Image: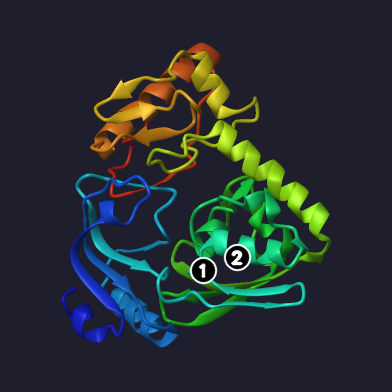
Amino acid sequence: METLNTMTKGTYLKDELMSKHTSYGIGGPARAYVTPKDKADLAEMLQFAKAHDIPTYFVGSGSNLLVADEGIDGLVITLGKSFNHLEINGANILAESGVMLGKMVKECISRHLSGVESLIGVPGTLGGALVMNAGAFGGEISNYLKHVNVMTMAGNEKQYQPGDISFSYRHSTFPTDEIVVSAEFELIQSDEKTVMEKRSVASGGRKASQPLKFRSAGSVFKNPSEGAAGYFIDKAGLKGIKIGDAEISPIHANFFVNHGKAKAKDIVKLIRLARETVQGKFGIMLDLEVKTLGFKMGTFDV
């Protein structure tokens, strides 16, 4: 693993605490945390990891991620600080995966481009948003996608058309051993009034219903077909429940917040409590929306 330090032209951090790189402020050390400088550098990192059977994980800005207190025994690659080129020509958007989604959305809104207004305020990078098919208030990142460029563990580039990847609610079928490098979108040229109205609905709804003052990873669970996950957690009487410094938010029951010193184990206990209680009261098993790294299989089972 140390060889990567001399190989990369970007940044190499050994035993880097993931708590520094997640919106939760939670997570133990990754054996290696690498930010490649460019595509050639990324290809070399991936080829090396594949040749030496090094477990490799791809993360964006860590905004929808819970990392175990024990950390990650492997290589973590992030493109957030290097792959951040954004180009807008008319209604066509070309963005690298490290571009912050919020920046892209704001730039589109300022040009009266319609299609991504509902994503205003959604945290994270474009790459992470595509992999989880991020969405809010009826809109999803995949709706206006033209194509996506990825890189394989062999260091080869591939391009996917929208029909090559299946997108569904907070899910996509991108192979887990490929990393999103860039994507192109085609939005709709609209007018200022229409775009700003859609933006205001999304922005106002988020401020009114989410605990934005505290560290969190956004929605912990996907909404089941029966309704909103937060509704069932609330009706199960779990709003405001605390374990350690972690709490099921009194504002939005599908947000589990860190009041400053929470550990991953505290969030895990709240997740298990919510799943078990909702299952017992309503017969609904909640599925995780938050991504998890470093946990043993079965950690979240009830």
Where does residue 50 sit, x and y in percent of width and height?
A: 33, 75
Residue sitting at 73 percent across and 62 percent down? 144
Where does residue 19 sit, x and y in percent of width and height?
A: 27, 51
- From the viewer's perspective, tell me whether residue 225 is left or right of residue 212: right
Residue sitting at 32 percent across and 22 percent down? 242
Q: Earlier in the sequence, mark 1 or mark 2?
A: 1
Q: Is residue 175 above or below residue 96?
A: above
Which residue position holds label 1?
99
Say whether residue 177 is visible. yes
Which residue position holds label 2?
104
Marks 1 and 2, how far apart at CA: 7 Å
Closer to the camera in the image, 102 or 181: 102
Amino acid type shown at disc 2: Met
Residue sitting at 55 percent across and 15 percent down? 282
Q: Quadrant of residue 6?
A: bottom left
Q: Quadrant of residue 250?
A: top left
